[in-house]
Amino acid sequence: MNLYRTLSAVLFAVRCLLFIITFALGDPRENSKVGQLSKIGDDNVKPEVQQSGSSQNSHSPPTKIHKPPPRNSEQYSTSSQHCVNTENINCSELDAECIDCVFNEKCTYGKNVTVECKKKPEVVCKADETFKREMVCQYCYQTPLSQQICNGAQGCNSIQAPRPMLKHNCTVIPSVICLGSRKFYRMMPCNWKNGYRWSTAFILSVTLGGFGADRFYLGRWQEGIGKLFSFGGIGLWTIIDIILIGVRYLGPADGSLYVD
């Protein structure tokens, strides 16, 4: 998708340049036969913003049990995905979604406590089915963001100042044991990406900015046409866009953030 946007922007700029040359140097009788240029559509489809119930937002100290291996957020959609093919795993090493623990809700917040756990009836594992695990005394919505997977609201304006606060659907990563529900809503700033790269936009602005290629790439094709036929504002507009994109002030038209 990113490569397609880049090629589309470059192709549009080249075709417009050829049109200008043909119109200026060709036979005036043939100029009327030149077809209209095809218009580049906006390929970005804005997903609907996810809205749900109330939010439980709270600040917590950055306490971690351990650093889990990085995983894709789709892997956390259902607990059953983590509780299959566990025949060769010790029961004490199962994810939190595969075990039942006895919690003491009167524990001191932020302190490490030991809880007694056992595997769920449908889970198959090795060694003792009853064991002890260490956890931090906190509710799941109080865990740090590094231990949460949140599905951000998409389609909002991430470059708006200040950024709008929206409801996000969050889930605690499977390796963390915590109190309460493992799924909750959290108010977070609008922060989503749609495949636009800052490096690509900056290179286009430096090399083909005079033809509006950077504006076409960012989905700002109306401004790109104006920049093309004004030859980059006689160079002034090109210089301004190089600065704006270089400091990341000018971003995609759909309101998303750069991916790099």
Image (cartoon, helix red, strand yellow):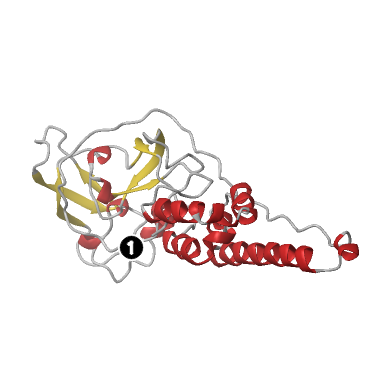
**Element type where label 1 sits in the image:** loop
Q: Above or below — where is 142 with respect to 68?
A: above
* Residue shown at 53% from the left, 58% from the top: 214
Viewer-closest of 110 and 209: 209
Is residue 78 visible to the viewer in this orientation of the structure?
A: no
**Pointer 1: what residue?**
124
| For residue 68, side relative to residue 29 (left or right) | left
Q: Above or below — where is 168 with respect to 248?
A: above
Quadrant into which the C terminus falls: bottom left
Is residue 5 visible to the viewer in this orientation of the structure?
A: yes
Q: How many marks?
A: 1
Q: Above or below — where is 222 with respect to 15?
A: above
Q: Residue furthest top?
A: 54
Name the residue type under label 1.
Val
* Residue shown at 19% from the left, 62% from the top: 128
Quadrant into which the N terminus falls: bottom right
In which image quadrant can residue 202 be found? Answer: bottom left
Viewer-closest of 190 and 14: 14
Viewer-closest of 13 and 220: 13
* Residue shown at 35% from the left, 38% from the top: 188
Q: Percent position (x, y) of residue 219?
A: 57, 51
| For residue 216, side relative to residue 132 (left or right) | right
Viewer-closest of 108 and 23: 23
Q: Percent position (x, y) of residue 13?
A: 64, 63
| For residue 165, side relative to residue 225 (left or right) | left
| For residue 260, side relative to residue 236 (left or right) | left
Q: Percent position (x, y) of residue 206?
A: 46, 64
Q: Percent position (x, y) of residue 115?
A: 14, 47
Q: Residues within 10 Å of mark 1 (few under 14, many from 20)?
A: some
In which image quadrant can residue 140 be found? Answer: top left
* Residue shown at 42% from the left, 54% from the top: 245
